[in-house]
Image: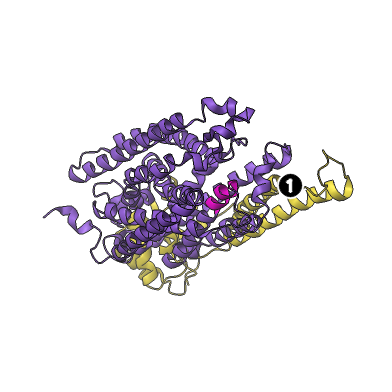
Amino acid sequence: MNPGEAYLLPRDSPLEQMATFAGVCGLVGFVVCGAMAVATPAAVAESYLFAFLFWSGIPLGSLAILMLQHITGGAWGAVLRRILEAATRTLPLLAILFLPILFSTGLLFEWARPEVVEHDLVLQHKRAYLNVPFFAFRAVLYFVVWIVLSHFLSEWSRRQDRAPESIGLRLENISRGGLLLFVLTMTFASIDWAMSLEPHWYSTMYGILFIGGQVLSALAFVIPVTAVLAARPPMLEVMTADRFQDLGKLLLAFVMVWAYFSFSQFLIIWSADLPEETPWYLRRLSQGWQWAAIALIILHFMLPFVLLLSRDLKRSRRWLMAVAAVVLAMRAIDLSWLVLPAFDRGGLLWVPSDFAAFLGVGGLWFYYYVRQLRSAPMLPLNDESLPEMRGLQP
Amino acid sequence: MSAGIYGLMAEFSDPSALVSAARKTREAGYVRIDAYTPYPIEELDEAIGIHHTRLPMIALIGGIVGGLAGFGLQYWTSVIDYPINVGGRPLFSWPAFIPVAFECTILGAALSAVFGMLGLNGLPQPYHPVFNVPRFALASRDRFFLCIEAADPNFDADETWSFLSRLQPRQVSQVDE
């Protein structure tokens, strides 16, 4: 018998039922989106872009955390490793899910409409970068980089299971360069896919703000997944209160990083008060979006910040899961606040196609995620910090 | 209680032996115990029965006081004491006050954590009986010590000595007052 078999995702795990449910939701969501797209293709494209940016944040943030834990080490990383690897292996699916965006650039982006660019001097100057063929080329490049990185990270990690020889250094080295490459490609991707929705506006903070948000999304996603898995073996034995506390500390740190980046961007633009920069915030602080902004300050920062200060809360599986769920929900609100005010919706914050696209992309993604989770042991069997995690003394 | 004795001390050569000895000591009903190690050991707090300290609360209060003071100082200087029109912005430009208030929060929390820690530990302390054991100098190198204090209600010089010896330490020493 394969020694890793005892470490596979249990067949009766609640995640399996959730995956089936999510798969059905995903199909329904896509059918509804398709039907709506006949009448209002632009509105559906907008919703789809928002949904894609939210759900792709989880695997991309996971890729960043995965490489970070290979560089820094530690028991928290070893328990999360397989859960993160599974998330990064969904990137090929996301590359396919990106195709609808690629084919609706004209509906989404001003710079892709020749009749707009014709009368806009600034966009004519930006045409060397903001044009559809180059946009498509860059998107392909980003996905190739991410998929190659995630492939080797998963592949070598699995090889470590089969052969006990240390492959850790190789994983560490690919992570060093990989993290650098990820931050570069993701910065450009966030500019292409989200910032260029308002092509006159620019912020040097945007890329890193986007990445910080993705890492937070990924943490807020893997904490509930880990908490569900921790209810039974094999994760039961390693997910002690100490490990949950580690994850809680990381969540707290990234909640603060998000707030820090968000506020830095706001403070710089608010202080300079320049006519080409302020419209971005003016749109997001009027027409109802100000309520989303206030909700973000309270529920995306203040509430999780205050709660996560507590040691007892971080050590409690259920409480930590609840806080992470709130953060994850607020990540969706944050993404919608970043993306959707760029479009003219006549004073509506969210429209039905937003929910349909959110369910469609998210459902399919989660179904595929659980499939990936099933394909490898839940723990890196030969990781050097595994004996320590199980509480065995060296 | 024996006069002139601070307690009994057992010496261990690795951290896990110390942690398991500390657990057994707690199970045997001793409460006035302390452990000394060259570096922090994660499970030790819990093993010697320290669950909660007041330090996080002190740091939190220090942080809140620091933050409010930093914000208040800026409000007072730029709105009340010396109002200046800067580029037409309102006098009470709260976004600009946030970074300084944030730094003051950290300053307040850090200072109250350091001084709170010293205060709760009773430091600086020029004399402590554990240093009367010559081998105790090794606690800052590679040895791990567990001390049962004579003030413990269950302390009995002979019985506690034989209890400690059963934990398989490298050696048991008497700590003089």
Report whether residue A176 is seen. no
Query: What crowding class fits label 1: few (fewer than 14 Cα within 10 Å), some (14-19), or many (20 or more)?
Result: some
Q: Is residue B29 visible?
A: yes
Q: Is residue A1 above or below residue B84?
A: below
Q: Is residue A172 left or right of residue B74?
A: left
Q: Position of residue A73 (x, y in %)?
A: 37, 43
- Residue type beneath disc 1: Phe
Give me the chain that's yellow.
B
Would you say A216 lies left or right of A115 here? left
Query: Is residue B128 covered in magenta?
Result: no
User: Magenta segment, principal secondary structure?
Assistant: helix
Question: Magenta residues, as a range?
Answer: A334-343
Q: In the image, what residue occupies the spot 66% across and 60% down?
A: B61
Where does the image place residue B34, in percent across and percent down from the top left? 46, 61
Seen from the viewer's position, the closer of residues A44 and A64 is A44
| Residue A260 falls left or right of residue A370 | right
Counting labels gives: 1
Q: Residue at x 69, y 41 (%)?
A: A278
Per the rendering, the colour in which chain A appears is purple
Q: Nearer the viewer, residue A230 or A283?
A: A283
Q: Residue furthest front?
A: A39
Name the secondary structure under disc 1: helix
Is A38 on the left or on the right of A85, as rendered?
right
- Closer to us: A251 or A120: A120
Above or below, A256 against A127 in this view is below
| Location of residue A89 with respect to A128 vertically, above or below | below
Image coords of residue A344 (percent x, y): 60, 49
* Quarter location, residue A363: bottom left
Judging by the rendered image, the residue that carries numbered circle 1 is: B97
